[in-house]
Image (spheres, rainbow, N blue to C red):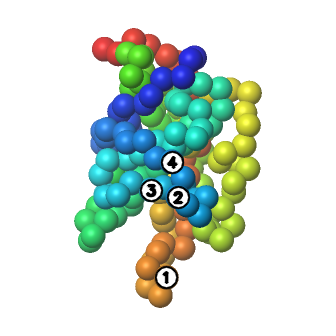
Amino acid sequence: MSRSRPVELVIPAIDVTSALIPLGLRRDGTMQVPPKGFPAGWYTGAPTPGERGPAIIVGHVDWAGRAGVFAQLRQVVPGDAIDVGRADGTVAHFRTIAVRSFDKDAFPTGLVYGNLDRAALRLITCGGSFDRRRHSYRDNVIVFADLAALSPTP
């Protein structure tokens, strides 16, 4: 598929429907995160959903004491559908192949951002226990999904 800005994320298994905002890099070279608990954001430095390679969508598990857009992401299981509406009027339909947690100090950069010979999607949020000293969760929950189909927007 050609490049097209993602505009909406739908994960029926966890009742998520979210607009998507563009995210780039911070001055220190790390990826920006959404400024609030909603909506989720897509990383503009990666392929868009449906293009060859891993598209990246991130969201908060919680924000300011409330559930964030990806509060239930760890409950997604292999086989679950993930749909991404695109600005060109198409919907990229993905199927979850794995859900894994990684210590933030051992983030699997190659697995998440590495080149692929197919269209894929990575959903990322925080997880594990909360480190009060660092004001951060200790882990990242990552959903790995592959493109299953493409259709016009209903």
Q: Which residue position is annotated with label 3? A: 33
Sequence-wise, which precedes: disc 4 or disc 1?
4
Question: Are the two marked residues, 4 and 2, in contact with CB atoms closer than 8 angstroms?
Answer: no
Q: Nearer the viewer, mark 2 or mark 1?
A: 2
Q: Nearer the viewer, mark 1 or mark 3?
A: 3
- At label 4, the amino acid type is Gly
Q: Residue at x 31, y 38 (%)?
A: 19
Query: Mark 3 and mark 4: span between their CA atoms?
Result: 9 Å
- Mark 3 surroundings within 10 Å by alpha-carbon count, few (fewer than 14), some (14 through 19), many (20 or more): many
* C-alpha gap between disc 1 and disc 3: 17 Å
Seen in the image, is 38 located left or right of residue 11?
A: left
Does 137 sit above or below residue 125?
below
At mark 4, the secondary structure is loop
Mark 2 secondary-structure assignment: loop
In the rendered structure, which amino acid carries the disc numbered 1? Arg
Q: Which residue is mark 4?
A: 24
The residue lying at 44 percent from left, 56 percent from top is 33
Disc 3 versus disc 4: nearer the observer? 4
Q: Which residue is mark 2?
A: 26
Q: Quadrant of the N terminus?
A: top right
Q: Quadrant of residue 81?
A: top left
Occupied quadrant, residue 107: bottom right
Q: Earlier in the sequence, mark 2 or mark 1?
A: 2
**Which image quarter holds the C terminus?**
top left
Q: Residue at x 45, y 34 (%)?
A: 82
Amino acid at dot 2? Arg
**x then y, percent, for residue 145:** 57, 37
Q: Nearer the viewer, residue 105 or 100?
A: 105
Q: CA distance from mark 4 to mark 1?
A: 24 Å
Q: Which class describes the residues within 10 Å of circle 4: few (<14), some (14-19), or many (20+)?
A: some
